């Protein structure tokens, strides 16, 4: 940086000038107190209330799955052309939500987006929990649950092996890898914060538990050296993984010949939708968490505005895909393809299509305006719309195409049964149960990383003249 | 009681960075700088080489990709050959996804296990934890520790040296284990 002349540095500093990532003048120990304090206080009654509701939901899920195992997939609303109903819709929905966490932690890390530190920890936790919810659906959907291990290349007495040319098997590997890598990434990020919890622990149980989980972290730079490079490598590995997982999920559809599925636009279209829905869910949870735990200085309106920009971009990409699908259907000249899309927009399921279109394409356009991007009630409402819209997107794709396939004599209308609904509602119960446990017992904001992006963490902050320090941060940090 | 070493606190990351370079220049080998977050430029100040984690990740990732591609080839051409949609037995294009997934999976395990092994972790105890000061590093402390098994370590001289480079709260760390 020293070779750059001063006037240049000054302009660069002026351009880069942004509101600080941490507001309210929090010091290093202020950050530690704030985040650790959340888990050290007495459990709030609100937490018990929410946990009770979430746990009831989990029991509903367990009950629905129990009945499914006893009775079989006949309890669902599946019929002959529509062999993939809510189970697959919910699977894609939850996997999609699970994309934001690793995107925030890996891609934004490689892009040096320092604002990610405020939200990455709980976005990653959300990812892990969402992928757990997602994983349940294909597993229970197999029908003969006792042979579910056929999905994995397990040597067996029949010398049978799975079909490695099937996208359904690619999915097992892609989602399995995604879960494992996200979990490892999350755990590595947690280690320094777990060590802080270990050093602050008062009770014997906490000392022992955090003592083991912190792996013996000693804060030394000889450890940080390996740690930082390992974290960077994980980010590098996770980045293509994030983009590949939903691409693979989309091949479940795209490699079939069903009209409306057999298109090459699916992988990028699914990835954009996944990031869109994931950010929607992170935003919903972030708005609640910052209010409940008074984190307004750490998760600032600037952070939320940045997420809204991502939602606007990815929402517009999704909207472009919806329109492009119609164009390609017309341009292909294939009558089955043309029919599939006219049927989506104006057939039996038109109501679902237009709910999807409104929530995913029209309402996010409000985020073009700064005022709406910074308004908490607006963004909270829109973030929920995003997730409604994205659930309907998967429903529209799965059900409209299947219910009107090549053979008109087999056409049928699909409606869910009470068990479909209870399984879906129950999966939200599981999601919130696990997420609330995370909020209660683990540091929900990456303390060490937030400290690392404050101006006081940069040795050049203490030099004479702050313009130089700022420019250095922007250029080489 | 065995002496483990000596530890001192420094005011802020900048002071720690300068002090680390002074410790290195004084010829100490067995010392470490403890901070709540990694400090930019500290590796150079301490005279540390780049971490070899990258090679472990590369090796593991290559192993994962080989296993992935090899398993699929073996299964579809020899262990359980089935004709599916008229595709050739060796349809390498279809193997790419799983090969990639295992590349990433093994690489990630390489990064995590490699990092912990290089740091000699997990470890349930370390003599440095007998120090009163060390817990400060998990909050807002910037510390330098010098181990007693360093050839240049001498209780009096090291104490005076740490004080001369800006160290405060200098503490002799004693304990078994």
Image (cartoon, grey):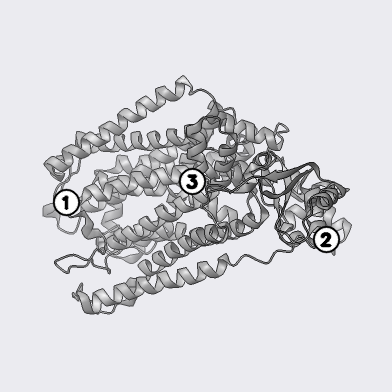
Q: In this view, does A26 lie to the left or right of B165?
A: left
Query: Seen from this angle, which residue lies furthest front?
Result: B1
Pair 2/1: label in front: 2
Point 58% across, 35% down: residue: A372
Point 40% across, 49% down: residue: A96
The answer to whether one can see residue A215 in this image is yes
B76 vs A350: above or below = below
Q: Name the residue under label 3.
A: A124
The disc label shown at residue A291, or none: none
Q: Mark 3 lies on which chain?
A: A
Figure quadrant of residue A325: bottom left
The answer to whether one can see residue A395 in this image is no
On whether disc 2 and disc 3 are found on a single subunit, the reply is: no
Query: Spatial distance from mark 2 to mark 1, Cα to Cα?
Result: 67 Å
Q: In this view, does B62 lie to the left or right of B127?
A: left
Return the residue nearer the eye: A437 or A312.
A437
Q: Name the residue under label 1.
A: A146
Pair 1/3: label in front: 1
A416 vs B94: above or below = above
SS assignment at label 1: helix
Q: Earlier in the sequence, mark 1 or mark 3?
A: 3
On whether disc 2 and disc 1 are found on a single subunit, the reply is: no
Q: Mark 2 points at which residue?
A: B26
SS assignment at label 3: helix
Q: Position of residue B161 (x, y in %)?
A: 84, 51
Q: Which chain carries label 2?
A: B
Return the residue nearer the eye: A218 or B55.
A218
Q: Where is residue A138 in the image (x, y as percent from the top left)?
A: 26, 50
Q: Are marks 2 and 3 in contact (CB under 8 Å)?
A: no
Q: Are marks 2 and 1 in contact (CB under 8 Å)?
A: no
Query: Spatial distance from mark 1 to mark 3, Cα to Cα?
Result: 32 Å
On whether disc 1 and disc 3 are found on a single subunit, the reply is: yes
């Amino acid at each position: 940086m020293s070779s750059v002349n001063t006037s240049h540095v000054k302009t660069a500093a002026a351009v880069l000038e942004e509101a600080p990532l941490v507001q309210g003048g929090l010091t290093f120990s202020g950050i530690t107190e704030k985040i650790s304090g959340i888990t050290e206080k007495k459990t709030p009654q609100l937490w018990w209330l929410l946990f009770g509701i979430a746990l009831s939901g989990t029991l509903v899920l367990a009950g629905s799955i129990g009945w499914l195992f006893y009775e079989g997939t006949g309890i669902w609303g599946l019929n002959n052309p529509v062999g993939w109903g809510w189970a697959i819709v919910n699977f894609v929905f939850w996997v999609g939500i699970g994309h934001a966490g690793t995107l925030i932690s890996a891609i934004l890390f490689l892009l040096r987006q320092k604002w990610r530190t405020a939200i990455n920890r709980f976005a990653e936790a959300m990812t892990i929990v969402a992928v757990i919810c997602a994983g349940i659906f294909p597993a229970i959907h197999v029908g003969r649950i006792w042979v579910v291990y056929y999905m994995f290349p397990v040597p067996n007495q029949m010398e049978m092996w799975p079909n490695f040319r099937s996208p359904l098997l690619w999915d097992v590997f892609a989602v399995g890898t995604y879960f494992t890598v996200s979990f490892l990434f999350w755990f590595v990020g947690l280690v320094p914060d777990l060590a802080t919890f270990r050093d602050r622990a008062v009770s014997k149980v906490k000392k022992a538990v955090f003592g083991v989980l912190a792996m013996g972290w000693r804060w030394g730079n000889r450890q940080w050296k390996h740690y930082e490079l390992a974290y960077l490598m994980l980010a590098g590995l996770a980045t293509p993984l994030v983009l590949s997982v939903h691409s693979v999920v989309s091949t479940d559809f795209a490699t079939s010949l069903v009209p409306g599925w057999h298109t090459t636009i699916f992988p990028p279209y699914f990835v954009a939708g996944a990031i869109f829905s994931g950010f929607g869910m992170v935003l919903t949870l972030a708005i609640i968490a910052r209010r409940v735990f008074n984190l307004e200085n750490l998760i600032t309106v600037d952070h939320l505005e940045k997420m809204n920009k991502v939602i606007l971009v990815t929402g517009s990409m999704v909207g472009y895909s919806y329109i492009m699908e119609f164009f390609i259907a017309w341009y292909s000249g294939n009558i089955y393809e043309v029919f599939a899309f006219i049927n989506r927009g104006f057939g039996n399921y038109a109501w679902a299509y237009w709910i999807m279109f409104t929530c995913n394409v029209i309402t996010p356009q409000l985020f073009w305006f700064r005022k709406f991007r910074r308004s908490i009630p607006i963004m909270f409402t829109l973030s929920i719309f995003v997730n409604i819209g994205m659930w309907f997107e998967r429903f529209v794709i799965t059900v409209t195409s299947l219910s009107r396939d090549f053979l008109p004599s087999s056409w049928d209308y699909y409606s869910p049964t009470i068990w479909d609904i209870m399984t879906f509602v129950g999966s939200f119960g599981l999601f919130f149960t696990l997420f609330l446990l995370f909020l209660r017992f683990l540091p929900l904001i990456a303390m060490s990383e937030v400290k690392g992006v404050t101006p006081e963490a940069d040795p050049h902050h203490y030099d004479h003249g702050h313009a130089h320090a700022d420019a250095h941060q922007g250029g080489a940090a | 009681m065995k002496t483990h070493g000596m530890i001192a606190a420094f005011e802020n990351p900048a002071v720690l960075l300068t002090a680390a370079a002074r410790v290195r220049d004084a010829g100490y080998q067995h010392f470490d700088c403890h901070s709540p977050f990694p400090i930019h430029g500290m590796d150079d100040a301490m005279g540390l080489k780049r971490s070899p984690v990258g090679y472990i990740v590369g090796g593991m990732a290559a192993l994962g990709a080989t296993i992935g591609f090899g398993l699929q080839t073996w299964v579809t051409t020899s262990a359980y050959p089935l004709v599916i949609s008229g595709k050739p037995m060796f349809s390498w294009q279809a193997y790419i996804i799983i090969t990639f997934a295992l590349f990433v999976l093994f690489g990630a395990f390489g990064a995590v296990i490699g990092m912990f092994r290089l740091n000699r972790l997990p470890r349930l105890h370390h003599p440095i934890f007998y120090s009163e000061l060390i817990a400060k590093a998990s909050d807002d402390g910037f510390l330098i520790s010098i181990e007693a098994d360093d050839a240049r370590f001498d209780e009096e001289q090291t104490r005076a040296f740490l004080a001369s480079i800006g160290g405060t709260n200098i503490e002799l760390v004693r304990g078994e284990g």
